[in-house]
Image: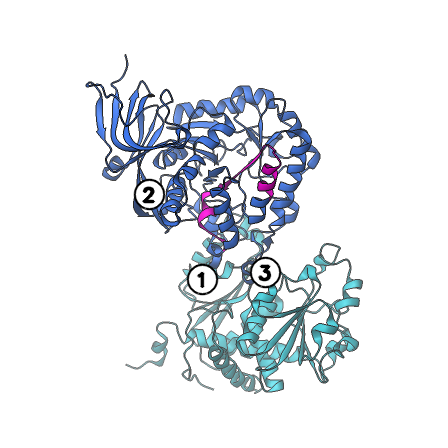
Amino acid sequence: MTSSALNFTFPFRDLLGIEGLSASDITNLLDLADTYVDLNRQIDKKTDVLRGRTQINLFFESSTRTQSSFELAGKRLGADVMNMSVSSSALNKGETLLDTAVTLNAMNPDLLVIRHGDSGAVALLAQKVSCAVLNAGDGAHEHPTQALLDALTIRRRLGKLSGLKIAICGDITHSRVARSNLLLLNAMGAQVNLVGPRTLIPADAERLGANIFHSMREGLEDCDIVMMLRIQNERMQGALIPSVREYYHLYGLNREKLGFAKPNAMVMHPGPMNRGAEIDSELADDTEISLIRDQVEMGVAVRMAALEALAANLPNMMQSGGTC
Amino acid sequence: MSEPERAFINARLIDPAQELDTNGSLLVRDGKIAAIGTEIEIPDTAETLDCTGLAILPGLIDMQVFTGEPGEEHRETLATASHAAAAGGVTHMVVMPNTTPAIDDAALVDFISRRARGTATVRVHPMAAITKNCEGQTMTEFGLLREAGAVAFTDGDRAVMNALTMRRALSYASNFDALIVQHALDQDLQSAGVMHEGELATRLGLTGIPVAAETAIIDRDIRLVELTGARYHIHQISSGESVEAVRQAKARGLAVSCGVSAAHLMLNENDVENYRTFAKLNPPLRSEDDRLALVDGLADGTIDIVVSGHNPQDAEAKRQPFAQAAYGTVGVETLLSVLLSLHNAHGLDLATLIRAVTGNPARLLDIDGGTLRAGAYADFALVDLEAPWIVDADALQSKSKNAAIEGRKLQGKVEACFVNGHSVFDSKMETTK
């Protein structure tokens, strides 16, 4: 497959979040991602859309899945991909976050994929570099490609997003996945229920355009999709919830609780899963019900679409055409 | 060997301490105000300055200024802070004790006073720590610290968290009728919080600080004031609920008073949109309803004091992800302009506003100042009450440029400032420099 001109304009230099994207921006990205799903299932998965481009994956927080998904996406588009993991200790040596950005910028990357543990850190870095920046997760703020891949997964399985009812369950307070999904699903006309114990639901969450529930029975009622979030162990030792046992009893997804949702409701999880903490292991592996593997596959396609959409806005894109 | 007398004529004279707001003249002799009023006699030998179009106000007392001296002089020294203060018409800076080392010993109070006399252009009054190293554990020597010149006691930007320690501090301070000043923010409730808890914090993915983190300390302390009969002041309140708590305490006749920062009167939580770290303050900027309640509380006298909370931070400390960035804004230079803007734009009573930065802090801290009475030190500001200007952080005198109100339009500007009758700031000279 050879490079083809984008048939839409993505009106942003960076992809820092879902906030600010219109329904048509989202639809364009999903449509493009659809074509990459097909490509990724062929034997020859390579294109040259990003040939000559340099993509740096800058991860201040370790993440095997997201980083490898971005790496594969870049490579399949023909970019040169470099992974940089910056441990917090490197920053403690005295180099500030912005020093790191300036250093990297001097290497003239075209695309910078950044994950950072602090909300707003990716936007801060984006101000200091001259390339296109993709947010691969910043603190508890946003994780836009996760929301896009979730949307693509749902759209391919149920044919639409508009009019669906989707429950997002678990640790909403600390979840960038929940925020980005809420923004995207609202923009696309889906209804979102946020479900979790009061200690894990942030203040005024209902004003973000969601219905809030504290029981799975009420929160899952009539839902087409049940999206479970990862619960981190350090939050389950009495600080925000008393124990894993109690959490699983009240909020862990099993077949019985899934029965509160619509018949044929599907289950999603951004991974990595804590089996037996937020989700029943056997349920997670049931491909009739679980979309978890689809999500991983869609992740690569969505990231290819996002990389291409941003690359199309880079200056000197025409030079690769060689028209003299 | 007295200097020539100087007469400032044709000025609008504003001194709430004398309920004075009239056109007239001010005569300065030997560093003191010799006469003030409409019909005063100006000696022929006096040097006269025509102040037509300008007002003369008592030099301001800023009751909460953080500097980096000693320990972090790269942020601000007493000298650089004093230049900023003079440019803002502030002739008295009350400096906080949470320095490195903390001002928790009489020798250190003396150090601040000596450094100030040697380097600063305005008067400096140190507050001393309530507890050793501001750690909230062991009480400091209130008696010795007072004799050394500490005007009040506070742990700076940390609340005394232990209720028993606080009870004992209040009780012991009442021996001397000393003022205990609290930073009302419960550290446990604050936890990892960095901004006002609410919709915006949720949207930004930042941990919120509930209003209850402030009111829990205020409510507790009011009980302890009832128990001990001590004089108690809160540096800055940030919420409508805190205004109400203080209002009720005052109605019960307790010696409770409070301040608010100029930034909190002008800004609200929305100023941290886009992770703007210059608006990361402690206590945090809260909702617009809270801001309006603070303005009302100031207007009706519930809030006694307006402070700048001047807290200089170098660029590196602010150029960080929001949660990592330092708290604080500079403000000693813009304190008066913010108040005049509130008067000009929103009709707040001018005398009430001026009193909150002159007579009220002078009374609470027993400082000889804050008035233009004949016989007082000639500490005053010449002010164009209506001059419009835009805050340009780089043009501020402070060593650090972290101004939360950067880019804001203000109305009212200090033209000149005098301490002991000597000029410490002149805008004309600044512009020609």
Q: Mark 1 — residue?
A: A126
Region rendered in magenta: B245-269
Which residue, as the protein is rendered here, is positioned at the far left?
A: B44
Amino acid type, label 2: Gly
Q: Position of residue B9 (x, y in %)?
A: 24, 29
Chain B is which colour?
blue
Amino acid type, label 3: Glu
Residue B311 vs residue B349, the one in the foreground: B349
Q: For residue A107, which quarter of the picture?
A: bottom left
Q: Are marks 3 and 2 on the same chain?
A: no
User: Marks 3 and 2, Cα distance to the nearest angstrom?
Assistant: 48 Å
Tell whether position B112 is magenta. Answer: no
Name the element at disc 2.
strand
Q: Mark 3 — residue?
A: A61
- Ranked by sequence position, the earlier of labels 1 and 3 is 3
Would you place residue B186 above or below residue A314 in this image? above
Chain A is which colour?
cyan
Would you call the spot at circle 3 few (<14 residues within 10 Å), some (14-19), or many (20 or more)?
Answer: some
Amino acid type, label 1: Ala
Q: Chain of mark 1?
A: A
Q: Mark 2 — residue?
A: B412
